[in-house]
Image (cartoon, rainbow, N blue to C red):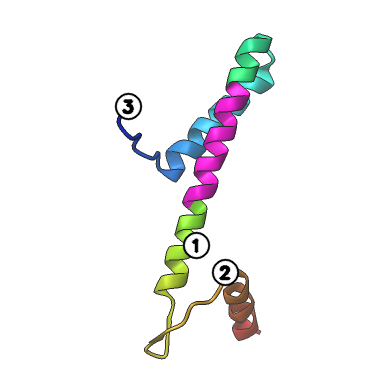
Amino acid sequence: MSAPRKPLNFEKSLADLEALVERMEDGELSLEESLKAFEAGIRLTQQCQQALTQAQQRVQLLSVQDGEVHVTPFAEADDADEDADA
């Protein structure tokens, strides 16, 4: 039985993904290596997306206005900030 893997942090996953893309763009990988790199890239992309989703959920939970907690989706929060700036 394998131990659960510790999730990578967003910055590490993104840096690994960028390095992987550079290797693939160089065009020096074999077909088999390219397929393995592509699979690794998909996993890294999913990890990054999951980290961003979790961060978005945390921001929504922590949004406080006028002493009360308000859950506001990112898009609406961005629109409200732009309206306040105008």
Q: Confirm or deny contact between disc 3 and disc 2 (CB under 8 A).
A: no
Name the image quarter holding residue 75: bottom right
- Mark 2, secondary structure of its residue: helix
- Labels 3 and 2: the sequence-earlier one: 3
Q: Amino acid at mark 2?
A: Phe
Q: Residues within 10 Å of mark 1 (few under 14, many from 20)?
A: some
From which residue to which does the magenta span run? 37-51
Q: Confirm or deny contact between disc 1 and disc 2 (CB under 8 A).
A: yes
Q: Is residue 29 magenta?
A: no
Residue at 46%, 82% in the rendered image: 70
Q: Amino acid at mark 1?
A: Gln
Residue at 68%, 22% in the rendered image: 25
- Labels 3 and 1: the sequence-earlier one: 3
Q: Confirm or deny contact between disc 3 and disc 1 (CB under 8 A).
A: no
Horizontal placement of 11 versus 43: left or right?
Answer: left
Residue at 58%, 78% in the rendered image: 81
Mark number displayed over residue 2: 3
Q: Residue furthest bottom?
A: 66
C-alpha distance separating marks 3 and 1: 30 Å
- Mark 3, secondary structure of its residue: loop
Q: Nearer the viewer, residue 20 or 61?
A: 61
Residue bearing mark 1:
56
Q: Amino acid at mark 3?
A: Ser
Name the image quarter holding residue 17: top right
Q: Nearer the viewer, residue 20 or 38?
A: 38
Main SS class of the magenta portion in the image: helix
- Labels 1 and 2: the sequence-earlier one: 1
Q: Residues within 10 Å of mark 3 (few under 14, many from 20)?
A: few
Mark number displayed over residue 74: 2
Q: x%, y% of residue 3?
A: 30, 31
